[in-house]
Amino acid sequence: MKSLIKNIGILVGIDESGRDRIMGGEMKNLATMTDAYVICEDGLISSYGSMKDLPEGRFDEETDARGGAVLPAMCDSHTHIVYAGSRETEFVDKINGLSYEEIARRGGGILNSADRLHEASEEELFEEAMPRLHQMLASGTGAAEIKSGYGLSTKDEIKMLRVIRRMAEASPMTIRATFLGAHAVARDYIGRQGEYVDLICNEMIPAVAAEGLADFVDVFCDRGFFTPEETARMLECGAKFGMRPKIHANELAASGGIQIGVAHKALSVDHLEFTGDEEIAVLLGSGTMPTILPGAAFFLGMNYPPARKMIDAGLGVAIASDFNPGSSPSGNMKFILSLACIKLRMNPQEAINAATLNGAYAMGLQATHGSVTKGKRADLWITEPVSSLEFIPYAYGVSLTAGMILGGKRVL
């Protein structure tokens, strides 16, 4: 199939450098072209250029961007969108002054979602999760990582991961799956945390690997959850079964999670609200992508991670939605772009780079996703006509989506 996108007002994110991520001061650079076209063949970007140089030819599908911007579809590298029900009652608890940790100690939070998920069938979970995936698509997202972690038993974690696999088969989006059995200690194991870690290593991980259900293994290494020592053991176990480590770290305290993640060659360390000079020094020179989730800090009223300090120190950062029922109930990556600019003090170019190529890197997709590059997958977000690329995060409450091209085909 050969398709054309024409009359593009601003083509954003052009990159033929071959780099796999964007670091430090380079994050403020974002190549663009005005009055442009893009040609896609067999699902890949084959060429692009100025409209005055558009080659003659016939196309199976043509999309008129009508002066809108075209960007690489965003890569949301941290979501939890397979869950049952919602947790708006905890939203009211937060309004009334309870902290995330206080709600968890009262039996809410992750354990609340685990109880609900246990009662739901695979079909029910699939039917609830697919509209969330469509919401993400409608805000410009073309690739997503989806975590388990509301099962907290072998049977229910497998159930979640099977739903994620089914979603990947049903959706035009690119989806990566992460096993997060260590999201919290299961209710039946409270007071016996070591035994729950044993269960994850001796039963859950081998069962997940036997069905090939997960690309990554993740652990919530933080105050009140799993220790660095427990985290190291679970990451090592997952790696033996071919799951690359990722990690929830330093959301609630300086937990040592960043150091553990880097030591175990984690692809990403995520959250990072408590990140200082020591953690930045450890990340510099590593292959681990610091991933910031401003939606969670916004929703919980927490301090934001020091993204500006990280970038100025030479790090690249990714941003992701953390779409989940308790601490970030939205997968709107366009709003995440705005939060990155408004609250993290990232400029629009840095925010877009963080949501595209660096987000792709945080899922291991940098060779195929995250930039307008000849030979990469043709995943492109088309906006309504805009005056500049800065307008995209500036207009924080406006959808702007005019279309989505995934694998060279229009899906929205």
Image (spheres, rainbow, N blue to C red):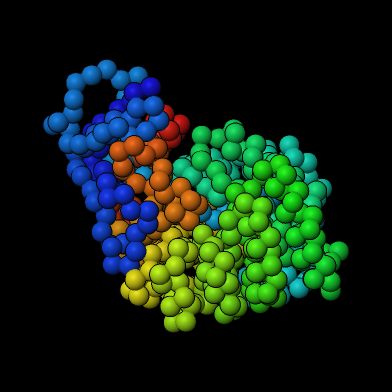
Is residue 88 rendered to the left or right of residue 262? right
Q: Residue at x 48, y 51 (%)?
A: 364
The quadrant the C terminus occupies is: top left
Q: Position of residue 150 (x, y in %)?
A: 72, 55
Q: Residue at x 59, y 60 (%)?
A: 245
- Which residue ends up furthest to the right in the rendered image? 188
Is residue 65 rendered to the left or right of residue 84? left
Is residue 151 rendered to the left or right of residue 403? right
User: Is 181 drawn above or below residue 66 in the view shown?
Assistant: below
Q: Position of residue 148 (x, y in %)?
A: 67, 52
Q: Position of residue 373 (x, y in %)?
A: 31, 42
User: Is 109 drawn above or below residue 146 in the view shown?
Assistant: below
Is residue 297 rendered to the left or right of residue 341? right
Q: Position of residue 345 (x, y in %)?
A: 36, 70
Visible residue check, residue 151: no
The quadrant the N terminus occupies is: top left
- Which residue ends up furthest to the front in the rendered image? 240
* The image quarter in which residue 213 lies: top right
Q: Nearer the viewer, residue 393 or 406?
A: 406
Q: Residue at x 76, y 54 (%)?
A: 204
